[in-house]
Image (tube, rainbow, N blue to C red):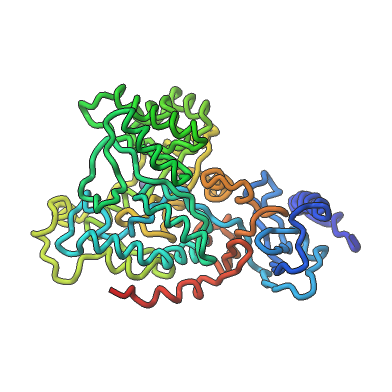
């Protein structure tokens, strides 16, 4: 290490450098050393952010990252990290590199447009639901590209029809796709016949035996999660419902599969935790979480996904107030953006009552303040928070809605690094890929090269100049090119 500048370095940079040098030492004997035929990519001169580390080590300036095939082989100061002859070089001077973002809560069977949840607002008279579903399946490749262009290199789909398992296969078969973790149909306390086209995403279950039977059918497809839609209404028997959730969880756990639960009220969320939930896919929304909740959540080492934007998404879209953000204008599927507004000349009086009321009120929706306070509480209590959007629901578009979600997480009191950690290091726990979520030798090369510092402003996370998935570099503009053409009818 000639011309060692250590003496003159600020302590912050020095610590970062020592750590990455330590990692470099391992390389020579490690199994991820490049094979002769593997393509080498070098990202040179970047400021690398390490959300997987603590304190000053999080930021390492003027670093080079070497990638062989789909793995990172070296990360170190540019001055000391030799770029092999023939490597593809990405000049990242003045740029920031982060691990790929992970959206821990999405639904591919939904598009985010107005026609995607006829159980909430029935707009079959404008666009038949069968047509909407056909569209969502036919445009999967485009939806995958929107995710990558938004810097999202992994997602967890937490519930949909059995064809969700084909979505995971399609993502595995494509280079231009995020990694996809998949869940089958929801084991639900309520029926949603409006969504049943022969392969329903939500199935009403009324006994522990019926739950075990459905779990067995889902386990045949090797799901990443089994999910319960734990809807508890006034008059429902919580103990009987909890028995169904427990039977579901026990059957999933016996097969080594984690139990994800939708439970948005404190009483129901605590019941879900007692019954074996590993992943709460939403905030507790109705009242502040208490000591009992925190104790149960800690004991089960759960993941907690706030999904702060999704209810606002519905409110904006159904009231006619939905407007794309600047990032959504650049990155979202333009077809979905169009379908978030009613066709020109639609007669309001024939719309579902719920929409008519919201359109007439024309009111800015209120922030989910209880959920936002609970996020701060659970974070401070050491619960593992993961970033997730619930994308696909009306008003929450696939891809760039991650930026809306992260903005609300920050407005809840988390700092930019904590938000980034929830969207990377913690998200790796949702998709259960240990080699994700950090920038270090041996890790999978899922990375985002950003034009500006995301720790200074989270909005800069939408400014990717390159997104790498499995070591393959894409530019967002190139990814989005096929979306400019509409889907053939
Ligand atoms: Zn959801």
Q: Is residue 107 left or right of residue 339?
A: right
| Residue at 34%, 55% in the rendered image | 109
In this image, 19 relative to 337: left or right?
right
Q: How many marks?
A: 0
Residue 229 place in picture, x, y as percent: 33, 38
Q: Is residue 190 above or below residue 410?
A: above
Image quarter (top left, top right, bottom left or bottom right) of the C terminus: bottom left
Residue extending farthest to the left is 349
Q: Nearer the viewer, residue 385 or 31?
A: 31
Which of the two residues, 184 or 270, is positioned nearer the viewer here?
184
Q: Is residue 257 shown to the viewer in this render?
A: yes
Q: Position of residue 424 (x, y in %)?
A: 56, 50
What percent of the width, then of the height, locates residue 477? 49, 74
Where does the image place residue 105, in percent across and percent down from the top left?
43, 48
Q: Residue shown at 46%/55% (left/top)?
A: 168
Point 40% across, 59% down: residue? 398
| Residue 394 horizontal side relative to residue 411, left or right | left
Q: Would you identify the image quadrant in which residue 108 lies? A: bottom left
Residue drawn at x 8%, y 59% is 349
Q: Is residue 11 visible?
A: no
Q: Quadrant of residue 426?
A: top right
Q: Nearer the viewer, residue 214 or 392?
A: 214
In front: 182, or 17? 182
The quarter of the picture where the N terminus appears is: bottom right
In the picture, measured across the screen, residue 111 lies left or right of residue 421, that is left
* Identity of the residue furthest to the right in this view: 2
Whether 225 is drawn above or below 34: the answer is above
């Amino acid at each position: 290490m000639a011309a060692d500048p250590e003496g003159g370095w600020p302590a912050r940079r020095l610590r970062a450098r020592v750590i990455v040098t330590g990692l470099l030492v391992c390389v020579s004997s490690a199994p991820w050393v490049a094979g002769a035929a593997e393509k080498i990519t070098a990202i040179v001169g970047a400021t690398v952010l390490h959300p997987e580390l603590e304190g000053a080590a999080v930021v390492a300036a003027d670093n080079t990252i070497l990638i062989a095939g789909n793995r990172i082989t070296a990360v170190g100061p540019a001055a000391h990290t030799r770029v092999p002859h023939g490597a593809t070089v990405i000049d990242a001077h003045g740029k920031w590199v982060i691990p790929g973002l992970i959206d821990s809560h999405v639904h591919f069977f939904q598009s985010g447009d107005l026609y995607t949840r006829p159980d909430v607002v029935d707009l079959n008279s404008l666009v038949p639901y069968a047509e909407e579903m056909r569209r969502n399946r036919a445009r999967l490749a485009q939806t995958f590209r929107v995710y990558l262009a938004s810097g999202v290199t992994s997602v967890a789909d937490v519930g949909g029809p059995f064809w969700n398992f084909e979505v995971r296969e399609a993502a595995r078969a494509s280079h231009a796709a995020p990694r996809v973790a998949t869940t089958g149909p929801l084991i639900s306390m309520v029926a949603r016949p409006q969504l049943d086209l022969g392969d329903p995403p939500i199935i009403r279950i009324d006994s522990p035996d019926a739950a075990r039977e459905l779990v067995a059918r889902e386990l045949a497809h090797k799901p990443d999660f089994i999910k319960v839609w734990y809807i508890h209404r006034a008059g429902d028997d919580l103990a009987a419902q909890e028995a169904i959730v427990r039977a579901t969880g026990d059957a999933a756990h016996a097969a080594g599969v984690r139990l994800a639960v939708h439970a948005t009220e404190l009483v129901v969320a605590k019941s879900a935790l007692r019954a074996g939930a590993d992943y709460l896919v939403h905030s507790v929304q109705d009242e502040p979480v208490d000591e009992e909740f925190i104790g149960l959540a800690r004991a089960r080492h759960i993941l907690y996904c706030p999904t702060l934007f999704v209810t606002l998404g519905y409110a904006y879209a159904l009231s006619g107030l939905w407007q794309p953000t600047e990032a959504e204008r650049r990155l979202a599927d333009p077809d979905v953006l169009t379908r978030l507004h009613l066709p020109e000349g639609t007669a309001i009086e024939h719309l579902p009552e719920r929409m008519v009321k919201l359109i007439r009120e024309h009111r800015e929706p209120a922030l989910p303040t209880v959920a936002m306070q609970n996020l701060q509480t659970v974070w401070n209590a050491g619960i593992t928070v993961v970033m997730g959007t619930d994308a696909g629901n009306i008003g929450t578009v696939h891809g760039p809605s991650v930026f809306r979600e992260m903005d609300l997480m920050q407005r809840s009191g988390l700092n930019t690094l904590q938000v980034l950690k929830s969207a990377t290091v913690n998200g790796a726990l949702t998709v259960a890929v240990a080699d994700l979520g950090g920038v270090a030798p041996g890790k999978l090369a899922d990375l985002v090269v950003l034009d500006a510092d995301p720790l200074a402003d989270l909005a800069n996370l939408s400014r990717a100049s390159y997104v790498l998935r499995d070591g393959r570099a894409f530019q967002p503009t190139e990814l989005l090119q096929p979306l400019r053409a509409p889907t053939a009818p």
